[in-house]
Structures are given as C-alpha cells and as structure tokens.
Image (cartoon, rainbow, N blue to C red):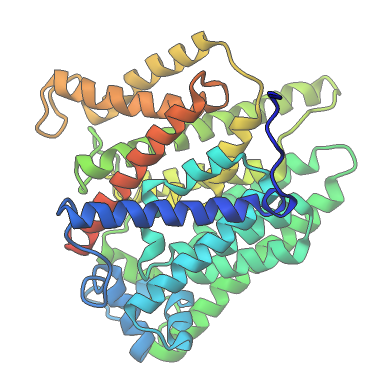
C-alpha cells in the first residue's frame, strides 16, 4: 500500500477556511448541547436572557434615539452603528445575535483566507473565549467586520477598503482614540521605506480624514437628537471614564474567571509597546548609518499600535482596573494578524521561551501575586494560577514548533470553548464578565 495520502478535492482546498468555520460551528453546537443536556450550563441565548448590560442602552437608541443627561449615565456614551443596523434589520434580540454571529463568521473566514492561516490555527483562534461577545447584541461583530476590511485594505493596498473600514469602525465604537496613534506610527514607519513616502502620506492623510468624518457624523447625530454635539465626550465622566493615576496591584472586577484573559491582553499590550519602541530605536540607528531598514508589513504595525493604544487607554482611564481590555484586544482581527505573524516566523530556541516565561512570571507581580494581595489566594495558589496562565500564553507563542501540535491545539481548543460557554452563561445571568 502506498504511504501517501490522497489529495483533498479541489473545492475543499479552495474553500478550506469556510469549511473550518463550518466545522467550528458544528463542534461548538455539539459541545453546547452536551453541556446543556447534562446541566453543566443552564442558560442559553434567548430573547429573555440577552436583554443584559449594554444591550439595554443600545436598545434605547434603537427605539427612541439618543438622550443626554448632565447629571447621570445616558446612552450618549454609545455609538450609532449597532443600534441603527439593529433598527434597520427589524430583528429582535435573538435575531440580532444570530446576525452578529453570521457577520463575524463570514469576516473571520475571509480574514483567514487572506492571511493564509493554517486550518489548525484558524480553528484555535475561532475558540478565543472573548468571542462570546460575537453572539450577543454588542458592537464586537460589526467592529470585527470593519476592522477586517481595513486590515485587508492595508494588506492588499486597497485604499477604499481601508477608508471604509476606518469609517465603519469609527461609527461603531470609540476607534479614533486607539486608531489615531497606531495610524500615525504606521505611516511614519511606512514613509521611511525607499520610495514609499508618498504612498504612506496619502494613506495616512486619507485615514485621518475618515476618522474625523466618523467623529463628525457621531457628533452631528447626537447634536440633532439631544442638542449637545459633545454628548459622547461629556457623558464619559458618568461612566467612570476619567483620567486617573495607576493603582497597584491591578485588579479585575470580573474576577478570576476573566482575569486570566485580561492579564494576557495586558501582557500583549506591554509587549507590543516594547516592540514598537524597539522598531523606532532600530530605525533611528540605521537611519543615522544611511542603511535600508527592513520594516514589518503595515497591517502588523497597525495591529501593534492598536494594542498599545487600548492598553494605554485602559490604564489611563481605569487606573488599576483591567475591565474590558481582553474584550477590546482578543475579539478583533488585530489579534489574529499578530498571531498569524508570530506563527510565520522561524522557530525560536526553547531557551528564549524559558526566558519569556520567567519574565512573564515576574510581570504578574502587577497583580500582587507575591505579596498576598491577589484576590483571596495565598501566594502559592496565586503562583499556580498565573503559572497556568503563563503556560497557556507560551503555548500560543510556540505553536508553530510544538512537537505535539495537533494534540495541544485540540486541548486548547476544547478548553477555550468550555471557558467561552462558561463566561457566556455568566453574562446571560447578569454576572460581570466584560
């Protein structure tokens, strides 16, 4: 018998990323039904259980438009894209959740195809626990769609994709806050390449124009409906979004169920800041020596800048609370771009991973794990908790060279899905998992 394996049919190879999405949906449905049947999870999305958290505010905008209050929280703190799409769709809660999920799955398949993600890695990324927000009436799905458009616009040099993506993101959530520093840094690094200055300036200027247009449209909409054009900005203080000093140790109101994700998002943001600083320093040294500077692809630089922007925003406006940082980083195509880039690099020596793991364990002291200040854990329990978090993180970093890649990928995949369903059930019960 020959040892070679028969090649897959052409249509499966051509649309393999779509088939991976279909397989993921099937596996998720099977696991959900099994856990529900045995009583491990008791809540599923429905019109009754989905009316939670920010959905209430989006529904207010959908039904009656914006309201601004100078003395209390108001829906002026939210952006119009989701509630208006919701209104136009004519769907109710469960229908809008299914629409969000469908939009996300379609965009993720397109992104995986364009990035040429290996099927195993695509499947693993589809199980990211923070993606629970793709199946509720939140902005994550629309933001993922428009962010995918801008990422692929950069990758394929399609200017209109880039502009439409930026505009859509700016109408969906406060993208300009995180995007503007990332855009400026990307354009600066791009313009330093031989023969790329004009292209970089055109893309940067038009991109800033798209962000400014989105800000103008949001302000005009709120001005027309409330009489206050700066409603979004002024409403933030009632939601606790004000500049404040860092408080140590860092914490997470969502508790240990979500903190491990937010901690890794913080780690990624700090690592991205370090890499951006190194890129700028390396460029400066080579510019002085009049040598060409090999730079990363624009979409990778923008993704790094976005992670830095989110991290700075969370730390600046929430003090030591990491609430939402994992959701803002992991439930985006920028995380997919960075993982895909990492997976494309040559293999590292294992001693580098050991150094990263050791440094990461020291980094977790921002949560006070060595000083009896972490939650209700003892020092030993805290070290074990964050040791598992570190092992999880290193598995993603070393994925491309894992000896038992298939087995470890499936282990991580199942664990991620269980955590996704566990966190979704908590959200449906009105527990804080954001």
Instruction: Name the foreground residue: 355 vs 272.
Output: 355
Q: Would residue 325 appear left or right of 110 to someone viewing this image?
A: left
Q: Position of residue 66 (x, y in %)?
A: 37, 84
**Where, quadrant-wise, is the N terminus in this rendering?**
top right
User: Is 152 left or right of 262, judged from the image as shown?
Assistant: right
Q: Residue at x 37, y 60 (%)?
A: 133
* Horizontal and vertical percent position of residue 35: 23, 52
Q: Residue lying farthest front?
A: 1
Residue 101 position by quadrant: bottom left
Q: Which residue is most to the top?
A: 351
User: Looking at this rendering, what residue extends furthest in the right direction?
Assistant: 195
Location of the C terminus (image quadrant)? bottom left
> What count of labels does the image hold?
0
Quadrant of the rendered structure where residue 75 is? Answer: bottom left
Seen in the picture, residue 356 relative to 202 is either above or below; the reply is above
For residue 185, which quarter of the picture?
Answer: top right
Residue drawn at 50 percent across, 26 percent down = 405
| Any part of residue 244 in sight | no
The residue positioned 37% from the left and 50% from the top of the image is 130
Residue 425 visible here: yes
Residue 325, x across and y down, in percent? 37, 47
331 lies left or right of 417: right
Closer to the camera in the image, 208 or 130: 130
Residue 289 % position (x, y): 83, 19
């Amino acid at each position: 018998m020959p040892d070679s394996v028969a090649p897959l049919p052409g249509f499966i190879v051509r649309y393999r990323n779509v088939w991976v999405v279909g397989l993921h949906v099937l596996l998720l449905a099977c696991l959900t039904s099994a856990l529900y049947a045995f009583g491990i999870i008791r809540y599923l999305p429905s019109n009754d259980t989905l009316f939670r958290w920010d959905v209430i505010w989006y529904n207010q905008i959908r039904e009656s438009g914006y309201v601004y209050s100078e003395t209390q929280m108001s829906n002026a703190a939210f952006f119009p894209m989701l509630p208006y799409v919701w209104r136009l769709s004519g769907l109710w809660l469960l229908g809008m959740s299914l629409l969000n999920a469908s939009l996300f799955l379609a965009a993720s398949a397109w992104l995986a195809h364009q990035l040429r993600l290996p099927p195993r890695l695509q499947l693993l990324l589809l199980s990211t626990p923070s993606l629970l927000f793709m199946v509720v009436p939140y902005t994550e799905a629309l933001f993922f769609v428009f962010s995918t458009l801008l990422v692929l616009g950069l990758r394929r040099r399609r200017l209109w994709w880039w502009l439409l993506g930026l505009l859509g993101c700016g109408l969906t959530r406060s993208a300009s806050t995180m995007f503007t520093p990332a855009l400026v840094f990307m354009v600066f690094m791009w313009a330093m390449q031989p023969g790329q200055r004009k292209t970089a300036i055109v893309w940067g200027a038009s991109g800033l124009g798209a962000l400014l247009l989105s800000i103008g449209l949001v302000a005009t909409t709120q001005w027309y409906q409330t009489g206050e054009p700066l409603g979004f900005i002024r409403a933030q203080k009632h939601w606790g979004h004000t500049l404040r000093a860092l408080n140590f140790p860092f914490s997470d109101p969502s508790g240990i169920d979500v903190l491990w994700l937010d901690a890794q998002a913080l780690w990624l943001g700090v690592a991205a800041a370090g890499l951006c600083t190194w890129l700028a320093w390396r460029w400066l040294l080579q510019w002085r020596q009049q040598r060409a500077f090999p730079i990363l692809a624009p979409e990778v630089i923008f993704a790094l800048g976005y992670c830095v922007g989110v991290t700075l925003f969370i730390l600046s406006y929430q003090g030591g609370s990491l609430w939402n940082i994992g959701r803002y980083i992991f439930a985006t195509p920028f995380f997919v771009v960075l993982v895909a880039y990492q997976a494309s690099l040559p293999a590292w020596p294992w001693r580098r991973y050991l150094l990263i793991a050791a440094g990461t364990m020291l980094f977790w002291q921002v949560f006070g794990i060595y000083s009896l200040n972490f939650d209700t854990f003892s020092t030993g329990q805290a070290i074990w908790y964050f040791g598992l978090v570190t092992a999880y993180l290193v598995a993603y970093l070393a994925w491309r060279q894992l000896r038992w890649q298939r087995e470890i990928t499936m282990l991580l995949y199942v664990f991620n899905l269980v955590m996704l369903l566990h966190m979704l059930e908590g959200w449906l019960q009105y527990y804080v998992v954001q």
